[in-house]
Structures are given as structure tokens and as C-alpha cells.
Amino acid sequence: MSRKMKNKVVKNLKIEKIATEGKCLGYHEEKVVFVAGVAPGDVVDVRITKGKSTFMEGTPIHFHEYSSERIEPFCEHFGTCGGCKWQHINYDLQKTYKRQQVIDQFQRIAKVPLPEIAPILGSGETRYYRNKLDFTFSNKKWLTLEQIQSGEDFERNALGFHIPRMFDKIVDIDHCYLQGGISNDVRNELRAFALANQLSFYDIRNQVGLLRNLIIRTTSTEETMVIVQFGELDQESIDLVMNFLKEKFPSITSLLYVINTKGNETFHDLDLVTFAGKDYIEEEMEGLKFRIGPKSFYQTNSKQAYELYKVARDFAELKGDEIVYDLYTGTGTIANFVAKKAKQVIGVEYVEAAIADAKINSEINGISNTLFYAGDMKEILNEEFISSHAAPDVIITDPPRAGMDEKVVQMLLRLEAPTLVYVSCNPATQARDLALLDEKYQVEKVQPVDMFPQTYHVENVVRLTLKK
């Protein structure tokens, strides 16, 4: 950023509309100014933090007028932890902006003919809707400027969420409105127990310390999985922590731990220890049971996942005699969900543990017309694989936020399945892939689904058919 723009204050900036990643924008001297923590209709003074030839970014330092679209945030941590960036905007408008986000991304990136974008399917629950949360232990608790300037001596150990763009600073969470059940109690009681017993909280920068990470997963069937990550092998202290959780919370149905001395918190390549209960929890959907292991992905809004999968199934328009490929199948949720309406479903997923769960999910539900394979999608979906299986009539793809690898897109174009259903958690990468698929496919239906109230994230389902 140039010296001229550094710390420049733009006064009385009218915030016009929602932009990407939860930010809003206004216009100053024919430049777009992106601002976080504001709402369309606000009039603010903005301190510029980044400037380019065509745009600027800044933070609000004074509000002259508040938007009529604003509401009072309900969480004391709003604006600090960064988890719920839209609590200050009422839910009806959140849905409007999310649908518009899909429209904008498709028009700007996909640039393909589109049908009318359907109204977004809103979430029935806007609080306590998540079934999984990750909390980080840290000996570097985030302190506000007021706390620092007070001169008081504050406890520096924390258990909570990362401060945005500060990997080693953690905001200590008292109450989180994202997950219900015993989640808040488990986190707060464990933190208090650790402090009382002088157990070391992880030093993220120097990568030392006992307590590293806490994962809590819940289901609509009232099962709870708790996973504790330890940063060092101190069995006496580990047993102390795990016995505390076992005795304090007998409703935990799956209590596990893992020793992780790596440079990151991922544990897909590590062995977990089942300390008490089962090594999985079970979710139910439309009479089907889905087993979820500690390494398995499952949509984090269980009730809304059902709505999402119903859209995907409806878009597939299955009659009962189709061969369906379910790409990025995870634990086989979609595959098993649509299996009763298909001749055969073939699921492919990178994580081997998830595929193991997918096979079990078929077995426990008495589903015999599914096949599952583990491997890198762009490597496994090759000519040999295709020649050894029936050609797909329908392909359902639900990739991660990065979208599909271009090799995968090219293989889909070669397969020429009559119907392609694309489920996405990132309309931008979905739009990019649609631009490539436009070579042979046309977009017939688009249905946004809100899985994450109070955030700018939106899921989107697209039905494509081969061009005639």
C-alpha cells in the first residue's frame, strides 16, 4: 500500500451492498471500498488498511448512521472470534444476500445461460444448528486493547476460537450459540479443570504443551463424541483429563483422544484411542442410520443437510434403473440416501476411513446396491475405472470448497452422463467449474440452500443436462 493511502480515513462512506466473504462495499472517488463489520445502509468513517489501483479495504472507526437492516448481535463474542460475521443483519436479509451472492458469482465467473435462481431454502434453526465444533487450547489468550491498557493481570490460558488472521491468538469462549447439547458445558468445565490442575495449554508458536485441541460432535439422536488432542505424551495427565470427562459427562457416548506432535491440528494420519464408549456416533435421516467416525466428514447442520440432500435427489430425477456416480461421497450419505431410487450407486472419496464408514452405512441399512472406492479423485476416475464399471446415467458431485480438479471436470465431459447434479459449498468455484462444463452441459435448475445462518457461507445445488 502506498504511503499516501496508509491510514487514510474516508469520511461518510455510504455502505451500498454486501460483497464477498461477508464484507460490504461502498464507493469513494470511483473506487470500491470493502469494509467488514458493517451493513448496507450504514454511513461510516473508514480507516484504509489496503489500497490497490481499483479498490481499497478498510475498517470502520466511526458510525454516523446505522442501517435500518441492523439488529442487535446476541453473542458477547461477536466481532472478535470471527465465527458469525452476520449476527448484526436480520435473517431474512441474510437469505436475500446469500441468494444474490450465488447470482453474482454465476454471472461474473460462470458466464453461462442460467434459469431463474430459486429462492433460497432457509434453515429452520438459526442458533445451535452445528453438530461439530473445534476449539483450540492456547497459552496466548487474546486480550482487548482495553484489557491491555488496564494494567490488570489476566489469565493468559484460553480455550476457544482463533482470531481471524492471527494463528497464535485465541479468544476465550464463554458461550457459543453455534452448538447445543452439552458443548458449552464440556468446554467450560474442561478449561476450569485444566486451570485448577495446572495443566499446560498449547503454545501454538513454539508447538509445546499438553492440551492442544477439543472437538465436540453431536447428533440429532442425542449422541455426543468428544475428541481431545494432546500435544505431548504424558499418560498420567492424559488419563487425568479423560477420566474427568468420563465421570463429569456420562452422556458422552464416544470419548476419544489422540497424541498430535505435528505442526498442525489435522489427525487423519494419526491413530486415535477410544477411551470410553464407542468409536463412532450415529445420525439418522429418513429412517437411515449413518455412522460417523472421528475422521469422517458429515454436513455440520444435520437438519438442513436433509433438505440439501432432498434437493440433490429431486434434481437427479431417478426412476430406479439408473447407474449413479457419487463423487466426493464422504461417508456415503448421499449415495445411501439415493440408493433406493437407483439401480446402483458408485461412491468415490479420498479419505479411506470415510469410505470404511460408507460401506458400514450401507451394511447397517441393508443397502446392497452401492460400491465405494477410496482414492484421489483425479487419479481414481480414469479410463481403467470407467471401463470396469457401467457408464453413469447420473453423476452427483459434492466437492470441497476448492471445487473439482480440472482433470475431474475433463473426465466428466468425456463420460457424458445425461444428468449431472453439482452440490457446492462455494458458489465461486462452482461457477468456475460450470464455465468448463458449459462445453457440453446446460444449467437447468439452481437451488441455493442456507446451511450456516449468521455467516456469509451458502450451499448451492445445480442440475445440468447434456446439450442437444
Image (spheres, helix red, strand yellow):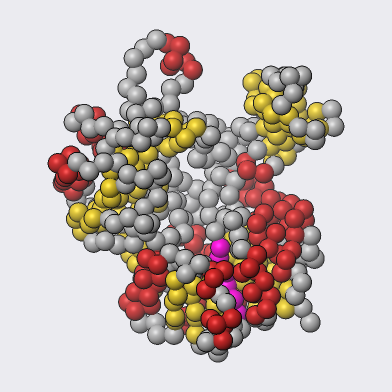
Residue 133 placed where, x, y %? 40, 47
Is residue 75 on the magenta stretch? no
In percent of the image, x 63 and y 33: which residue is there? 36
Residue 64 placed where, x, y %? 70, 21
Residue 211 placed where, x, y %? 28, 38
Is 189 or 42 nearer to us in this picture?
Answer: 189
Residue 405 placed where, x, y %? 61, 63
Residue 46 to residue 443: above or below: above
Main SS of residues in magenta: strand
Quarter of the figure that contains the N terminus: top right
Question: In the rendered view, does 264 fall on the left or right side of 53?
Answer: left
Residue 70 to residue 182: above or below: above
Q: In the current view of this chain or complex, which residue is farthest to the bottom?
A: 321
> Is residue 383 shown to the viewer in this render?
yes
Question: In the rendered view, does 98 fall on the left or right side of 191?
Answer: right
Quarter of the view holding residue 278: bottom left
In percent of the image, x 32 and y 44: which residue is there? 261
Part of the protein shown in magenta: 394-399
Quarter of the view holding residue 147: top left
> Is residue 63 shown to the viewer in this render?
no
Is 279 or 218 nearer to us in this picture?
Answer: 279
In percent of the image, x 20 and y 58: which residue is there? 277
* Label total for image: 0
In percent of the image, x 48 and y 51: which residue is there? 125
Quarter of the figure that contains the C terminus: bottom right
Question: In the rendered view, does 273 fall on the left or right side of 395?
Answer: left
